[in-house]
Amino acid sequence: MIIGVPKEIKNNENRVALTPAGAKELIKRGHSVYIQHTAGEGSGFPDAEYEAAGAKILPSIEATYEIAEMIMKVKEPIESEYKLIKENQLLFTYFHFASYEPLTKAMIESKAVCLAYETVEKADRSLPLLVPMSEVAGRMAIQKGANYLEKPLKGRGILLGGVPGVLPAKVLILGGGIVGTQAAWMAAGLGADVTIMDVSLPRMRYLADVMPANVKTIMSNEYNVRNLIKDADLIVGAVLIPGAKAPHLITRDMLKDMKPGTVLVDVAVDQGGCIETCKPTTHENPTFIIDDVVHYCVANMPGAVPYTSTLALTNATLPYAIQLADKGWKKAAQENADLVPGLNVINGEVVYEAVAQAFDLPFTPVEKYLA
């Protein structure tokens, strides 16, 4: 198979979908790998390392899309890329379709095969290609939140962990999944007073068992959310419904109950956000303020630490990429059930139900293509 890796062009996105080591593994199996010039530089992988692994360097994004049977990316295609995507071309990347209708409709029109990292799912319901970036984003949420609590950045002027004789900051985490767990570990390690909210009692029992004493759990419902936001200094939105739009747990009217300088970090923003007032921002302009509340809503947080993020992501994606290249997407999905829910759009039809529901589009069961 011919694999193309274009350079990411989303604002301040420095990750790359394939490392030189990954390229070498694919080439060993008889596949051809084409890398757009400087695609790996932001992550610390120069063109020369890809060439040493046997990959070929192409001068432009147009040339990369034109030659490839499978495109490997990190972030979803943006508008300037839509016209480059070909019918039957396999795109293997993060899509987050349910949060952006124009992308969904563009991929339908392209008649490409869209296999989304974020909905590849194991039998135990875990999301193996989302977990690595959720781990990075969860840890970064606290790192960034602690920074924006500083007064020069319009925060409350609170040190997350406090000092002897001064109480630490209160951190509220909405969601006890991978992002929430990693955020809690980081915040707890810095000495903050941490509360995690979730709707799953088994998950809260697990968290209560493994977390240090400065982490508490409480059932997530509107009443509890409204009470806890009044005293929180840093609030992390970490809610995920696989493939679907995130629910708004904090609504516009709740901001008036927060203290001036409270910081909101919505990690769910690439799925529509679980804080109603959040809208996607970039690393270039990461925050905005509404009602004296600081909103940090960068949609590609792990892109700020591309070396770590690229290695963490490609460790997880490469085994699946090899299967797709060796067998083609259809046979790979027939033989590995993990890949089936990853298929979101095929040849102009939406085959992932939550995406169809998000925009009231016709839904075609994926089995039509795998029979």
Image (cartoon, rainbow, N blue to C red):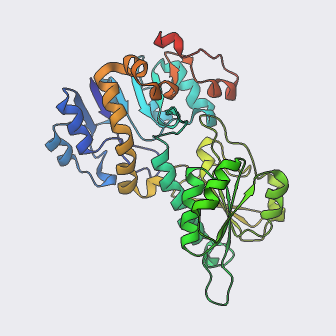
* Nearer-the-camera pick, 216 or 82: 216
* Residue 15 to residue 127: above or below: below
* Residue 151 to residue 318: above or below: below
Residue drawn at point x = 52 percent, y = 61 percent: 140
* Residue 312 to residue 27: above or below: below
* Nearer-the-camera pick, 120 or 145: 120
**Quarter of the image where one finds residue 7:** top left
- Measured as percent of width and height from the top left, residue 260 is found at 76, 71
* Nearer-the-camera pick, 278 or 133: 133
Residue 175 in view, yes or no: no
In the image, is 42 to the left or to the right of 186?
left
Residue 225 in view, yes or no: yes
- Measured as percent of width and height from the top left, residue 132 is found at 45, 48
- Measured as percent of width and height from the top left, residue 114 is found at 47, 26
Residue drawn at point x = 64 percent, y = 28 percent: 354
- Measured as percent of width and height from the top left, residue 39 is found at 31, 44
Residue drawn at point x = 47 percent, y = 49 percent: 133
Quarter the N terminus occupies: top left
**Quarter of the image where one finds residue 23:** top left
Residue drawn at point x = 42 percent, y = 21 percent: 333
In the image, is 32 to the left or to the right of 100?
left
Residue situated furthest bottom in the rendering: 165
